């Protein structure tokens, strides 16, 4: 579990300010990649994940959950369709389990899976001026903002991949290439006006954006087995593409119209709790916090959290408490003036 983020120092506050009002760069060292090849790759993967792979055009991507037969989330990934393969972007810590899970279902299919993480180096460029600095070094034009699109770019005789990433709060791009090329890209981005951001600042951005992370906010443990609709990530689900592993459970939940608990954002008043703190309302447990942070914003510091809460507590507008304070449900992303 990601630790509770304590009040940031001045350096982290400056990094966050750059992310929210300028452009900042950070290495994507926690990202892993799987390449899917073979003539059956599109049909096979479409039957393994929750979104519509078959509808993608070359260069397009979509966010997905990987489920088991009981509809429990086994991992998440973004799939990008290329002319000769499909690239699956996930986190490094998910790679062993995802590869084993997916490979188990390659039976008579012409499909091959390969871990290509070590072949790729990545940089995140985030902030309202991210498009401006990326365009300044000829990686893209400022008007190319189609989300979840992977574009091959010929850059100074080298090839790099630019991804227009999911952007609930600020613009975000990923730039991928070999180590030597990415070193030059980094230098050029900084000359163009980008500054560096630490993992702590990027984690704060994730919480401000309200984006859950698998293994932290999306759980698959003995104590917690989250279902797709409980996470609130409808962008990962397609309800008319046809059969896939776990679809029966997803469709059953959809036909019933709701889930008993849901992923949500909270503003905290009181002591900063640890991630995992229980939520109570009317003396009864109604949920738990999964990510917690004290965030320095211009003029004030806010305490925010991500977590799960029972829907009746939201619907009845009950006062929600945690050990040491009040957790007020709020809509995320957290809008910054």
Image: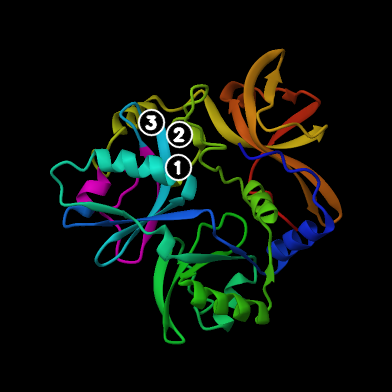
Q: Residues within 10 Å of mark 1 (few under 14, many from 20)?
A: few
Q: Nearer the viewer, residue 210 or 278?
A: 278
Q: Nearer the viewer, residue 123 or 333?
A: 123
Residue shown at 68%/59% (left/top)? Answer: 198
Under circle 1, the secondary element is helix
- Determine which residue is flagged by label 1: 234
The range drawn in magenta is 42-66
Q: Residues within 10 Å of mark 3 (few under 14, many from 20)?
A: few
Q: Pick whichever of labels 3 and 1 is earlier in the sequence.
A: 1
Tell me: residue 202, above or below residue 172.
above
Furthest residue toward left:
108
The answer to whether mark 1 and mark 2 are in CB contact below 8 A is yes
Q: Any magenta on residue 61?
A: yes
- Determine which residue is flagged by label 3: 254
Residue 308 location, quadrant:
top right
Residue 306 location, quadrant:
top right
- Residue 136: percent from left, percent from top: 58, 83
- Determine which residue is flagged by label 2: 229
Residue 117 location, quadrant:
bottom left
Nearest to the eye among marks 2 and 3: give it.
2
Q: In this rendering, would 216 be left or right of 326?
A: left
Residue shown at 63%/49% (left/top)? Answer: 333
The answer to whether mark 2 and mark 3 are in CB contact below 8 A is yes
Q: CA distance from mark 3 to mark 1?
A: 11 Å
């Amino acid at each position: 579990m990601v630790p509770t983020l304590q009040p940031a120092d001045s350096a982290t506050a400056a990094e966050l300010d750059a992310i929210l009002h300028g452009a900042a760069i950070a290495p994507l060292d926690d990202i892993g990649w799987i390449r899917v090849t073979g003539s059956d790759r599109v049909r096979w993967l479409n039957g393994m994940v929750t979104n519509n792979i078959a509808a993608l055009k070359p260069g397009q991507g979509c966010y997905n959950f990987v489920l088991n037969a009981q509809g429990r989330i086994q991992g998440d990934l973004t799939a990008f369709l290329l002319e000769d393969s499909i690239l699956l972007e996930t986190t490094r810590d998910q790679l062993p389990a995802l590869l084993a899970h997916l490979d188990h279902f390659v039976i008579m299919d012409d499909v091959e899976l390969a871990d290509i993480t070590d072949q790729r180096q990545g940089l995140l460029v985030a902030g309202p001026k991210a498009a401006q600095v990326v365009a300044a070094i000829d990686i893209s034009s400022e008007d190319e903002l189609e989300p979840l699109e992977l574009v091959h770019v010929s850059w100074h005789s080298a090839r790099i991949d630019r991804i227009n990433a999911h952007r609930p709060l600020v613009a975000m791009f990923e730039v991928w290439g070999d180590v030597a090329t990415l070193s030059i890209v980094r230098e050029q981005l900084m000359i163009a006006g980008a500054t560096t951001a630490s993992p702590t600042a990027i984690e704060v951005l994730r919480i401000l954006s309200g984006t859950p992370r698998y293994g932290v906010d999306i759980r698959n443990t003995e104590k917690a087995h989250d279902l797709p609709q409980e996470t609130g990530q409808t962008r990962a689900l397609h309800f008319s593409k046809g059969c896939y592993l776990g679809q029966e459970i997803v469709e059953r939940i959809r036909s019933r119209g709701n889930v008993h608990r849901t992923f949500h954002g909270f503003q905290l008043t009181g002591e900063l709790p640890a991630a995992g703190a229980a939520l109570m309302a009317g003396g009864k447990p109604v949920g738990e916090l999964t990510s917690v942070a004290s965030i320095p914003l211009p003029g004030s510091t806010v305490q925010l959290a991500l977590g799960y809460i029972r829907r009746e507590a939201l619907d009845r507008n009950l006062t929600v408490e945690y050990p040491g304070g009040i957790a007020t449900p709020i809509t995320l992303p957290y809008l910054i003036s």
